[in-house]
Amino acid sequence: MQRLTGLDAGFLYMETSTSFMHVASLMVLDPSTAPHGFSFQSLRELYAERLDQAPPFRRRLVEVPLGLHHPIWIEDPDFDLDWHLRHIAVPAPGGMKELTELAGHLAAIPLDRSHPLWEAWLIDGLEGGNVALLTKVHHAAIDGASGEELMVAILDLSPEIERKPPPAKPWEPERVPSDTELVAHALASLAQQPVRAIKTVRRTVEAALQIRETNRRQPDQKPPPSPFSAPRTSFNATLTPHRAFATASLPLPEVKMIKNARGTTVNDVVLTICAGALRRYLDSRDEHPDGALVAMVPVSVRTEDQKGTHGNRVSSMLCTLATDLDDPLERLDAIHACMAAAKEQQNAIGADTLQNWVEFAAPAVAAQAARLYSRMKIADRHRPLFNVTISNVPGPPFPLYIAGARMLATYPMGPIFDGGGINITVMSYLDSLDFGVLVCPELIPDPWAIADGLHDALEELAKAVDAG
């Protein structure tokens, strides 16, 4: 029995009938490399063999009565692998448009909280004889970094499936605790919160004073955007339950060339490419926001000691996308400067501050507030907290295989929520940056207009670097 942290539980409380807080990945696989053939059964056997390598796969939630405290994880006494593995075919002709349309529909299915919070869909019928694997895991169980580690549990470095040794201690299901036990455990945890709250308040005040002093000493450095300073756009509104998905793959060496030429980071270039694509999209709609778009950029704060653990070790920064600037190089420089300032503030605030504050959220109140916010469409009545979520997850530079099938590409899918109807997540793999663009189609009817614009934005940026 393990209690969720406040940050992990927060993703449960944020979930509504239109906002689903799972993360997903769409992998395109070449089954011809499997030495002993590839099938749904061979995939199932692989998952069954690797369950011990991925603890969240067999943990399910137990809610505390009356919402007194955050839920707990238990080893599911009713675990059934066949509940989580699904098999489906993509409509003909099985191209990327058909695959991503199906992926969008599957992403709009919420996870069942009475089971461990994950599922995997094997998708047949792709052109060229390929297959795809769509995996969904609730954000309460993983963040981007731990999600990558979770996928490593079922991936191999060669077509031959590596036989993992059995665990030193066999897995044992847990008894579902009684309401009395849950309440007693919750009260014991709550008794420690006043001391933690005092420490968190003191640390927050110290950080605020430090940031003010830093801004006073560096008057020429523009601070990062503040919450609710983002301009309104057509995609910053209340969501519907529907989802649409599009993808793009860009050459990583070209992105690194730009990074080296301008003295920035790969993430700065990624943000600039996204900025260019979003600017083009808004221009095509004759939509002109009253300021530069603002991105929320998740940042892993997982330490070396925390590697191999699951749950969320993540914070976030707000960064301008400088979409009010016409010159793509000026846009890149502005984003680089903003990210540097945001990182400096992040260091001053401390990696654990956000996690400490959400630890004190009242579960019943937080969940009710999220549902009320969605039901009353409050996101339509104020400026956005930010315009878009852009997340960059580093992946491996070497080929990976699942049940013998070579992974050709992996397109991540991050969650969207009321007020933020688009998420752009990118993962590097081999010499490619694989982008996943998840949207609410009632707010962005065609996500391919943005995904295709990523190619144009990279070309524009590369030409500017060459000309400069």
Image (spheres, rainbow, N blue to C red):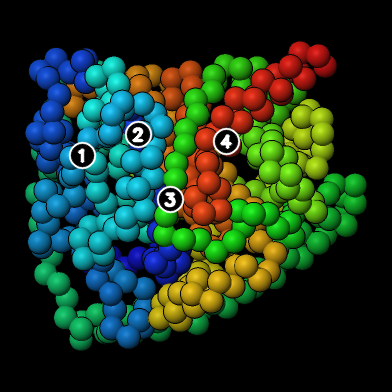
Q: Tag 1: residue type?
A: Ile
Measured in 3D between alpha carbons, the distance from the residue under mark 2 to the one under mark 4, in whole angstroms, is 17 Å
Circle nearer the N terminus (4, 1): 1
Residue picked out by circle 1:
88
Q: Are marks 3 and 4 in contact (CB under 8 Å)?
A: no
Where 337 sits versus 92, above or below? below
Q: Tag 3: residue type?
A: Arg
Q: Tag 4: residue type?
A: Ala
Secondary structure category for the residue under label 2:
helix
Label 1 neighbour load within 10 Å: few <14, some 14-19, many 20+: few
Question: Could you tell whether 166 is left or right of 461 in the image?
Answer: left
Q: Tag 2: residue type?
A: Leu
Residue 467 percent coordinates (x, y): 81, 14
Q: Are marks 2 and 4 in contact (CB under 8 Å)?
A: no
Residue 289 percent coordinates (x, y): 76, 51
The numbered mark at residue 243 is: 3
Circle nearer the N terminus (2, 4): 2
Measured in 3D between alpha carbons, the distance from the residue under mark 2 to the one under mark 1, in whole angstroms, is 11 Å
Q: Of residues 61 and 307, which is closer to you in this image?
A: 61
Residue picked out by circle 4:
449
Residue 404 percent coordinates (x, y): 19, 22
Image quadrant containing the C terminus: top right
Circle nearer the N terminus (2, 1): 1
